[in-house]
Image (spheres, rainbow, N blue to C red):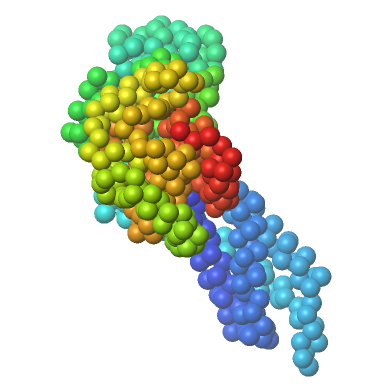
Amino acid sequence: MIRQRVRSYKVILLIADALGIGLSYFAAFWISVDFLGKSLGPDRYLDVFPWVLIGWLVVFRFSNLYNIQLRGSEELLALVKGVLIAVLVTLGVAFFYRPTLEDQGYFTFSRTLLVLLAFLTIPTSFIFRKMLRWGRYRLFKSTRHFNRLIIIGRNNVGFMLANELQKHDLGYELVGFVEDDSPANNLGGVNQTCTAPEGTLPDRQAGAVANPLGLTGSECWDRSPAAEISDGETRPENADRDTSANAWEQAVSQFPVVGRIDQVKQIISDRDVSDVWIALPSAPRDKLMKLVELCLKTKVSWKIVPDLYEVMLDWVRIDSLSGVPLIGIKRSNITGLNVVIKRAMDMVFSSILIVLTALPMLLAVVLVKLTSPGPVLFKQKRVGQNGRRFVFLKFRSMYHKSKRGDHKDFTREWITQKSAPARNNSGEKQVYKITNDSRITPVGKFLRKTSIDELPQIFSVLKGDMSLIGPRPPLAYEVEHYREWHKRRLEVKPGITGLWQISGRNLLSFEEMVKLDIYYIENWSVRFDLKIIFKTVFTVLFGKAY
């Protein structure tokens, strides 16, 4: 979310600069012709304008003009620097590139126009930046599009994040802080503490101050982020102690405490919170996982300030706000245009597969019908994308009306235990599946071994209930045992094959399967799908299926 907001903010700045350069260019041309009497061909300068605009924007990009922390005089100075570099680049290009015009000799870019363009672009771009930033803020406010945010951890890291949010219009409304039940995470230190000079803090707060930089003595106190005043300027080192206390109290008072950590669920509900940032770098991992589980359960977006020595998770994306790392969950890569591309691939490949597999499917219909009573197709309600139920199809491989009680017990053990014992009636190598199942017909064993029983699902792909590649669709009673992070499997359409099937299939535990599914969801690409399809064919022809 932060990355999206920052990107949209940079687009606003880009639009402001494009408007500023464009308006200044035509104003400079008008002044040159009408007031200074220059004879400039309008058609030629109109043809050149797009290249000038693109070139100047590229120069602005490399002049750090799209740094979201630029404000006021710093932004103005950066604009001056960027414009001067752009002028030099334009002069260089104009010197070497002089196209020949019919009956007019060489075209030379007017130096007068260029100087006017430079002087006009600086104030116009600066004004447009101010206007569009203000308009963006008013739009957020009028449409109530602010994300309502709480920060768990009333400490210096939390205060730093809050201060940065105040400086940048990223579309967040800070509801307040949630205090941790551990003093180490509330105004009392992160990783290491230092002692504040006597008399500089209110009695109830005197003593330890957060010291993530490892400073000592007066140096620690002077540079404590919590001693920063509200406009973000650090108190001068020679300020007296009364000023330090006032700065501290001012910084603390502007961020309200809305509750304690055991009230987070109620706070999210009562205050309509959409985002939670967990600023508890020194908290135990199990406490952080409980908070993350709560965020997933309440459907709020979350980010976490990590202990930098423990950032070893594979499915996270790391944003940064003023140098403070914020870990959030990676989102599905099957969004936007990728959804259209994947759906188009499904329709093309499923249409081809229906033709190629027509003979095996016809053979399966005949064998199932002749060898056991009952319907040819096995139909079952499964859970699809976002929990939507659909009819799952397979060629029937079991005797008609077989009981499912044993399977329910097994799946419960498989999902709820990291190393669920596999049931094997013959003492063969254990797998995470019931093998030598008496409910399976002789023909059914062949169909399963060759994966022919899965072929009717191609029609479900064509219909749109499934995809060729994706997580396997679970049963409703399986989903009942899912933890919150397991439910990420349901973010996309289920598939006939997937990363799990070609990576060990029934030799993998449930959590290993889920991790592979999540990896696929977060890293999807056309090339990834084609690779899985190729490996699936190889696995079916030469591998061992259970």
The total number of labels drawn is 0
Q: Is residue 184 above or below residue 118?
A: above
Of all residues, the one furthest to the front in this rendering is 370
Horizontal relation, residue 476 to residue 71: left or right: left
Q: Viewer-proximal residue, 362 or 195?
A: 362
For image coordinates 79% across by 77% down, the residue present is 98
- Residue 201 % position (x, y): 36, 13
Which quadrant: the C terminus? top left
- Residue 348 % position (x, y): 48, 62
Q: Is residue 509 above or below residue 534?
A: above
Please say whether residue 87 is visible from this viewpoint: yes
For image coordinates 41% across by 57% down, the residue present is 362
In which image quadrant can residue 52 be found? bottom right
Of all residues, the one furthest to the left in this rendering is 270
Q: Viewer-proximal residue, 293 or 543?
A: 543
For image coordinates 81% across by 70% down, the residue present is 96
- Residue 8 % position (x, y): 45, 52
For image coordinates 45% across by 7% down, the residue present is 195
Which quadrant: the N terminus? top left
Please say whether residue 280 is visible from this viewpoint: no
Horizontal relation, residue 142 to residue 193: left or right: left
- Residue 135 % position (x, y): 36, 57
Q: Viewer-proximal residue, 202 or 207?
A: 207
